[in-house]
Amino acid sequence: MNQLEFLFEVLVTLLGDVAKNYIDLRGFQRRLAVAQATLQAQQETARLTKIRFDAGLANDLDATQAEGLSQQTAAQVPALESALKQTAYRLDLLLGRQPGALANELTLDAPIPALPPTAHVGLPAELLRRRPDIRRAERQLAAATAEVGAATADLYPQLSLTGTFGLLSVSASDWFTERSRFWSIGPTISWPIFDAGKIRANIEVRNAQQEQALRNYEKSVLTALGDVESALVNYAKEQSRYRSLLDATVANRRAVQLANDLYRQGLVAFLNVLDAERTLYVTENDLAQSEANMASNLVVLYKALGGGWDTR
């Protein structure tokens, strides 16, 4: 691998890692915002339940359960904040900065990068040739094939033309006259027939190396195809999962509103309110994570194809 190709491979890996960590960071920010908003709503529910209990309109169990649910959600916030900080530090290191150098930029809330509805990657067979591992295996196969040809050529006689030119005289005074000059030219044949066993053994070694290079090339291609197909499937399936979670989130928000209304009317138990709020939080958290996963899967696809393609 030459220096330019090595640089390209490192660049694709670096860009992919930076994009992946940036997406993870925005995803953690989104999930943290969901947790904080849910916690605020659950604390308000716990406060109102406590007021109802003090007024004799609710029992102690309702107030205790409401407080327990809010504390359970509160316990998720530090973990998300820690993951957010760690991801920001990884971005700093990937960009050659000290940990915390980009804190002012990264702490500002920003959406997860928007994605195209489909990834127009073209023909995978053509795009795969950009992968450094495939190009490396292809060159190794070509070199091994050339070595087989060079080893086989040793079996045949080699013809070369040689010539000599000189001065022939017993007297230095005659060296530059026509009579003192001589030359000769003629063919030379070299045929290492007695080394044929050694040559044939060398040919077998080269053939084995070529076969190994061929298997390595086939393995590289199949691995690359598997990476691309897996990335495409994950990207498409995550989009389908995101749409389902989006519909579920809308329905669960409606369920929370209905549960609170029915509870205030005394038509359902307070447990229905807690279950609706807990389900809504799980769904909204999964929705934010799914959005980040879609973007991450697109980055994985970019790296699987060796980079360099446009999604427009």
Image (cartoon, helix red, strand yellow):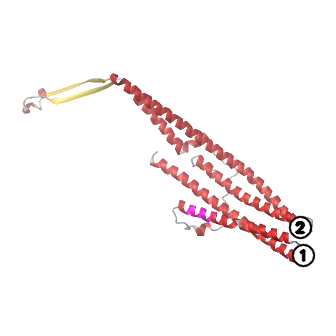
Q: Give the residue drawn at x 34%, y 22%.
A: 193
Camera-nearest residue between 140 and 86: 86
Which of the two marks, 1 or 2, is nearer to us in this view? 1
* Label 1 secondary element: loop
Q: Is residue 165 left or right of residue 143?
A: left
- x, y (%) of residue 187? 28, 23
Residue 263: image tag:
2
Residue named by callout 1: 56
Q: Considering only order in the chain, which callout, 2 or 1, is on the residue closer to the N terminus?
A: 1
Q: Give the residue drawn at x 50%, y 42%.
A: 136
Q: Is residue 147 visible?
A: yes
Say which amino acid is labelled 1: Gly
The image quarter containing residue 60 is: bottom right
* Label 2 secondary element: helix
Range drawn in magenta: 83-92
Q: Give the residue drawn at x 85%, y 61%.
A: 255
Q: Residues within 10 Å of mark 1 (few under 14, many from 20)?
A: few
The image quarter containing residue 53 is: bottom right
Judge whether residue 135 is colored magenta.
no
Q: Is residue 266 left or right of residue 50?
A: right
Say which amino acid is labelled 2: Tyr
Q: Give the residue drawn at x 41%, y 27%.
A: 201
Please, is residue 248 above or below residue 170 in the view?
below
